[in-house]
Amino acid sequence: MDKRIGSTWWTLKIALGAAVFLAGLDKFFNLLTNWTDYLNPVALQLVPVSSEIFMQCVGIIEMIVGIAILTRWTTLGAYLAACWQVAIAVNLVSMERFYDVAVRDLLLAVAAFTLARLTAVRRAEVASSDATRWESSPRGILSLKL
């Protein structure tokens, strides 16, 4: 396998998985920012909970997606993260605020989509390299020397 693909894949996997997980975890502590500022008030009209509870639920989802990216479900987690980041950007643009953060979230969505696609390429390369390493016996599966 090409080492450039492997190192790029590991960099994206760890960076995106950790970032998504830590952002979700911070929804409980608000150390990075006050997350409720980024919540469109219209969302609270649709869901009958406080903004803090809503953001904590969002945090749980983000932590699950981050774990998925960091484990064997990288492709699924990366596609979910990409969709999630686009939804966040749409939320911010619909508030007519935080356009800079919306652009950053769209770039994170592109990075997550790239990770998902790169995971497929990496798996195909691993599978093909495993297939070429296997050599069949010239005498078949079972050979008896009688």
Image: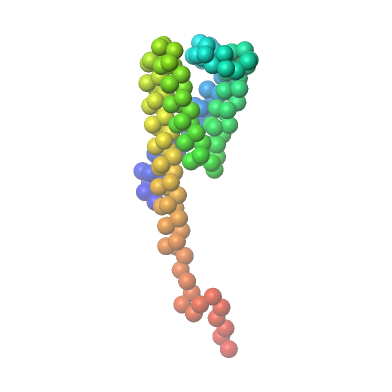
Front one among 143 and 101:
101
Instruction: Using the rendered image of the protein, determine whether residue 15 is visible from the camera's viewpoint.
Output: no
Q: Tell whether 122 sits left or right of 56.
A: left
The residue shown at (51%, 36%) is: 77
According to the image, what is the colour scheme of the structure?
rainbow
Instruction: Using the rendered image of the protein, determine whether residue 141 is visible from the camera's viewpoint.
Output: yes
Q: Tell whether 92 sits left or right of 41.
A: left
Residue extending farthest to the front is: 46
Q: Tell whether 43 sits left or right of 125.
A: right
Image location (x, y in percent) of residue 56 = 60, 19
Front one among 137 and 112:
112
The C terminus lies in quadrant: bottom right
Figure label count: 0
Front one among 144 and 109:
109
Image location (x, y in percent) of residue 66 = 54, 31
Residue extending farthest to the bottom is: 146
Which of the 4 image quadrants contains residue 108?
A: top left
Which of the 4 image quadrants contains residue 128?
A: bottom left
The residue shown at (52%, 13%) is: 42
Image location (x, y in percent) of residue 95 = 44, 12
The residue shown at (43%, 46%) is: 120
Image location (x, y in percent) of residue 2 = 36, 48
Q: Is residue 132 above or below residue 98?
A: below
The residue shown at (45%, 61%) is: 131
